[in-house]
Image (cartoon, helix red, strand yellow):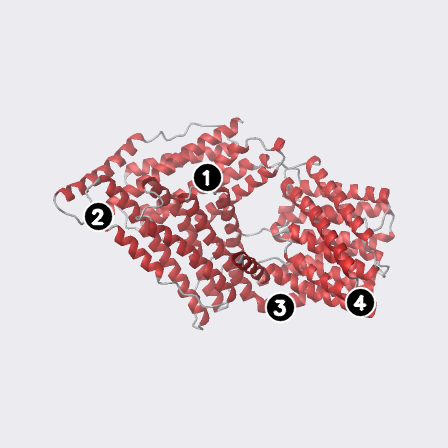
Amino acid sequence: MQRIFTAVLHRANKHILSFDFFKSAVLCLILGGTLLWGYYVHNYKAVFPLTIGALLAYFPNIEGSQRHRIIGIVIGFAWSFLMLAVQISLFDTPKWFHFSVMLTFVFITSMVAVYGLRGGSISFGGLFAIVSSYGIHAMGLKHAESLELVLAGGVTYIILSGISQFFYQGHHIRSMLADCVELTAEYYRKLEQQVWDNQDLESDILHIESRLNTFHEVLRSALLNKEGRLLSSNKTRRLYLIFKEIIDLYEMALAAHHDLEQAREHFNGTEPLVKPYREFTLMIVEELDRFGELLRLNRNFAVKPQLQTKLLEAEENLKPLLRSRSREAHERLLILRSLIDLKTKQLNRLNVISKHYENLFFTEKIRAQGDARFITPQDYSFKILLSNLNFESSIFRHSVRLCVAIAICFLLQDVISAENTSWIIATCIVVLRPNYGLTRSRAFNRIGGTLLGGVITLAILYLTDYKPLLLGIAGVSLTLGFSYVATRYLLASTYITLAIMMLYVAFTGRSFDLVVYRVFYTFIGSAIGLFTIYFIFPVWEKESIFTAIEKAIDANRRYLDAVNVLYETKEPVDTEFKLVRKEAFVKNGNLYEAFQRMKDDPKSKRSQLSNSYAVVLLSHSLVKGIAAYSTYIQGHQTTGISNDFRAVMGYIRDQLQVAADLMEGLPDAKPMVDEPLTALESLDKYYYGLSQLRELELESGVAQMSYETSVKLQEGRMILDQVKAIKSLAENTLQMCRVLKRG
């Protein structure tokens, strides 16, 4: 019971320290002040436009650098204010004209979402402004007075958000980095459970990888400016260095999968030889979790010495294998030696992170340079908008679909002829998303949250109708509701419904009928959203999954090419290599997200689901295999590349190229490079010769393996195993791509 209570307390504390809660608290501070002012001066009509103004500035406030965030808020509010002003001015025109112009602006505003996440937030703000115009008009204020109040609310939020964020920005970055650290720890934990406990956690692992890619993108934009220079703060530079080490730890986790699979083939998870490695991994996970928590709280962190002790214990376990003359013992020795090398590098990274973090509390200056190429650029040119004005674009279809949904809402409004039917339109805008799975999830969460919020409202009103208490509940509910919008929409819908009900009851005295209307309109709006997403120019993920597969396979091929260059040249890792590595991680994450959207589509619209998932797993295994190959050659002394090795790699590259071409829509073609059976036999003979050399050393009484033999034997065994695994994955990928195309 105490453990559950501690976990809940930790989660609540983590949420309170998050950026979502912070920006929600700033918004609700303004809304609370506005509500109290309106209540005590009895100027209820002015409260609504002031509140809307703050909300219009709140929606485009998303994570990123301080500069991008402020510019996004200003542009988003300006766009929303323009939409609101146009809508209010149309109330004096004929209804048909008002309706036509409104749908035109709905379409234009929806199309702004082509500019990525920030464009999507600006688009939502504009749509919310269009809907809010009906509520503002119903207040009975003059148009100019209403717009002045909206402007005042928006400017107040922009100023207060800018000032508060100036002080919060350091914690904001630390909080995001802490989330990234804890997610990396969870990734290590899941990999360990999957390998040794034989649990099917592949879907969980892919989900974590996708979330990590998102965190990496946001942190890069927060730590680097558009020229790639680090932001001026010395602490920011330190955090950037920690961030780079965390990414390397993540790649090591990917690489560890191959070594762990090899270990599982030769060892039982309960063997004493393996025990130190498993315990070390759990200790790494605990240290990362502890570091994430201390980073969020801005407290000191130092790596526990027990980790080094555990590695020494693992080294001691190797001595009996070193003295053994059996071939099996040599195989087991090489596998454990590779695991020790990997664990040592992980500990070294953790020590470097601890050193950088320790220096956060000192003032000495450091020089650290980023690279703008790591920031995924967003093209805001007008050409992007023009290129999406066709039915091939999912955003264009969504915009048309939204116009149809709002047109249906207006027809129903005339039929129902009831008060507050603009709630139907608001529900449509919130629920209707570009893809079916998210729309369905939002619709059900919206209905469930509204029902739950309504029931809680009636329960509270049964106990008390004391208005100051109702306003207090509304303020707390709004803060919690908006803080959960991006992460847990059911909770967000529940809290926001509760807050709106409390406010309406406090200002109008109505209760039961209000709850009934709210639930009814929410159900109607959600039903319209589901109807339009299914029947009006629907977008099914099976139509675009091939593109995601092609991009992931091509990124894997280029990642493999980059690692081969490192192997051949023996040059240190440079920025170009890291960019290729990042692209492979991102494209595989995008492929998993595309598959998840496909899985959420109706059963009749998701053909070849199992085959698509097979390709997702193959691509994911391939990037892990390449990461293992990359990590080994970066951390070990290696020999030169033979022509046989080049022949095998040329074959693998050809397999991946043909698979990518197939997914791109090109005709199936026979790979240009034949299967390199002779080259593989030569590599096998080379490794067998090294093994024979070691056996001769043992027979001659040499118990301690020579350094040169050790290096060559370990390299020959590990690289050969990795290359064979990558070759098999490439062949299976091409085979499955052919199955997909035939299907």
Label 2 or label 1, whichever comes before in sequence order: 2
Q: In whole angstroms, how far apart are the C-alphas of marks 2 and 1? A: 37 Å
Q: Are marks 4 and 1 in contact (CB under 8 Å)?
A: no
Q: Which type of secondary structure does the marked residue at label 2 adopt?
A: helix
Place of residue 548 in the rendered image (x, y in percent of width and height, measured from the top left):
53, 39
- Are dots 4 and 2 in contact, CB under 8 Å? no
Most foreground residue, 177 or 559 = 177
**Circle 3 sits on which residue?**
164
Q: Secondary structure at mark 1?
A: helix
Q: CA distance from mark 3 to mark 4?
A: 26 Å
Vertical position of residue 230 compared to residue 702: above or below: below
**Residue behind mark 4:** 39
Q: Nearer the viewer, mark 2 or mark 1?
A: 2
What residue would you read off at disc 2? 322
The kind of residue on which mark 1 rests is Ser
- Residue at image position (28%, 48%) is 638
Q: Look at label 3 and name its amino acid.
A: Ser
